[in-house]
Amino acid sequence: MAIKKMAFIVDKLPYKSETSRLALTHAIASQTVEIHLEDGENVEPVLAFIGEGVLNCLRNQKASEAYGVTTLESHIKNALLTDIKVLICEEDVKNYGLTEEQIIMDAEDIGADMPSELVPFSTIMSEMESADHILYF
Amino acid sequence: MGKLTIGCFSSLVGSMTLDFAVKLAEAARKKGHDVDMWLSGNGTMLSKKGQRSFKDYSSLEKTITGLVEGGANVTACEACAESRGYHKEDVISSFGRKSMDWYLASCFSADRVLHIGGE
């Protein structure tokens, strides 16, 4: 059985460009990648937010009201719903003066079991080191 | 020989990033490597046929079509293209159009992935 780990690293702001949205939609696409692979093969995605990218993880986003587009918050929750590991850099959250209460820490409201994790940057580095491929958004 | 997957998220006009990606793909093919190129986000602009060549702007249609004829696989994200009004009939006929999971599958079987982000 071949599993390849892919690390989706996001360090771009939400909404300023399409980049962080594409990171999320590509990570979530790992849920259907099997249709292109052989039996027993699969992709293990890890999604990590660092630097300015942690601002994608703010709760109570209003983009659907302001712009009529889906929020990055809803995409992050969908990632959690599909059991994608979501890591948020603890140091960068602190650098922006944010607290855990302001960050999307779970998606229980849509039935997700897996929470996101506030982790030191060293943990994200370890995930990148153990990944087969890094997709840096 | 190996397989190289290049993800391109940058626009054809407005940066030189796609020019670099295409030159890289050409070099890899010349060395005998397999090349998959994934065009997503603004990168799907490269898949639009009928690009008019101006000296002031990047013009890659001829180059990229030649690359595909030479064996490279160039595939554009269908949703990203459709959202920009690039429908199936607007896309260079030798290009593929797939969903994002195709890119991940290409990465799966690649020896190296170069993910070239957008602006």
Image (spheres, grey):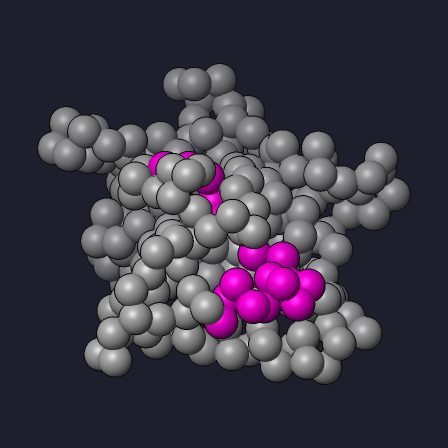
Please tell me whether residue A50 is drawn above or below residue B92 in the rendered image. Answer: below
Query: Hey, which residue is sitting farthest right in the picture?
Result: A1
Residue A69 at x, y = what percent?
Answer: 24, 32
Q: Is residue B14 magenta?
A: no
Tag count: 0
Residue extending furthest toward the left: A66
Question: Is residue A77 found left or right of A95 in the rendered image?
Answer: right
Name the dominant secondary structure of the magenta segment: helix
Kindly indicate the quadrant of the structure image that contains residue B37: bottom right
Identify which residue, A21 or B42, lies in the foreground: B42
Instruction: Give left or right: position of B50 versus B88.
Output: left
Res. A62 image quadrant: top left
Residue at 46 percent of width and 68 percent of height: B62
Residue A46 in percent (x, y) is at 58, 49
Q: Is residue A68 above or below residue A4?
A: above
Query: In the visual, does B81 lie left or right of A46?
Result: left
Q: Is residue B78 magenta?
A: yes
Which residues, given as a range, are shown in magenta?
B63-82
Q: Which sits in the foreground, A104 or A22?
A: A22
- Quadrant containing the C terminus of chain A is bottom left
Q: Is residue A21 something one can see in this rendering?
A: yes
On the rendered image, what quadrant is the N terminus of chain A found in?
top right
B54 sits to left or right of B65: left
Q: Nearer the viewer, residue B32 or A40?
A: B32
What is the x, y in percent for residue A95? Answer: 28, 63
Indicate the quadrant where residue A124 lies: bottom right
Frontmost residue, B38 versus A128: B38
Residue at x 43% of width, y 47% of height: B91
Q: Report whether residue B40 is seen.
A: no
Question: Residue sitting at 68 percent across and 63 percent down?
Answer: B71
Question: Residue A21: percent from the left, percent from the top?
Answer: 36, 45
